[in-house]
Image (cartoon, helix red, strand yellow):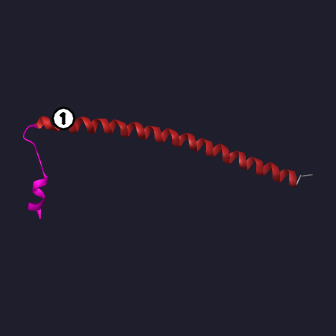
């Protein structure tokens, strides 16, 4: 089985052929970090908006309940 995969493996003698791969890997790693930070920031903003929305709904329900059944 290993003999079948051998033609697809290529390890160059000239190690300078690794440079383009390393540059593109570094570039995509930076993009990955920036994307991750953007998603976290966006998620935090949506979390705060959802929390404010939930508090507003609960406050309105509480006020509506108090108006329906005023305490003496």
| Residue in view at x 87 percent, y 54 percent | 68
Q: Which residue is mark 1?
A: 19
Quarter of the image with the N terminus in it? bottom left
Q: Is residue 67 left or right of residue 55?
A: right
Chain part drawn in magenta: 1-14
- Mark 1 secondary-structure assignment: helix
Would you place residue 32 above or below residue 64 in this image? above
Residue 39 x, y percent position in the rendering? 47, 41
User: Quick one: 54 or 22, which is closer to the camera?
Assistant: 22
Q: Residue furthest left?
A: 13
Count of numbered circles in the view: 1
| Residue in view at x 13 percent, y 34 percent | 16
- Is residue 36 in the magenta section? no
Residue 3 x, y percent position in the rendering? 8, 61
The quadrant in which residue 56 appears is: top right
- Is residue 11 in the magenta section? yes
| Residue in view at x 37 percent, y 40 percent | 32
Residue 5 x, y percent position in the rendering? 13, 58
Q: Is residue 29 left or right of residue 7?
A: right
User: Quick one: 37 or 63, which is closer to the camera?
Assistant: 37
| Residue in view at x 63 percent, y 45 percent | 51
Would you place residue 31 above or below residue 69 in this image? above
Classify mark 1: residues with Cα within 10 Å, few (<14), some (14-19) or many (20+). Answer: few
Q: Is residue 24 left or right of residue 52?
A: left
Q: Is residue 31 left or right of residue 66?
A: left
The quadrant in which residue 27 appears is: top left
Q: Residue furthest right?
A: 72
User: Quick one: 53 or 15, which is closer to the camera?
Assistant: 15
């Amino acid at each position: 089985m290993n003999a079948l995969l051998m033609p697809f493996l290529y390890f160059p003698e000239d190690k300078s052929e690794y440079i383009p791969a390393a540059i593109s890997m570094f570039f995509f790693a930076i993009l990955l970090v920036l994307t991750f930070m953007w998603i976290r920031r966006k998620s935090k903003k949506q979390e705060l908006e959802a929390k404010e929305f939930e508090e507003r709904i609960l406050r309105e329900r509480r006020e509506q309940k108090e108006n329906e059944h005023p305490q003496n």
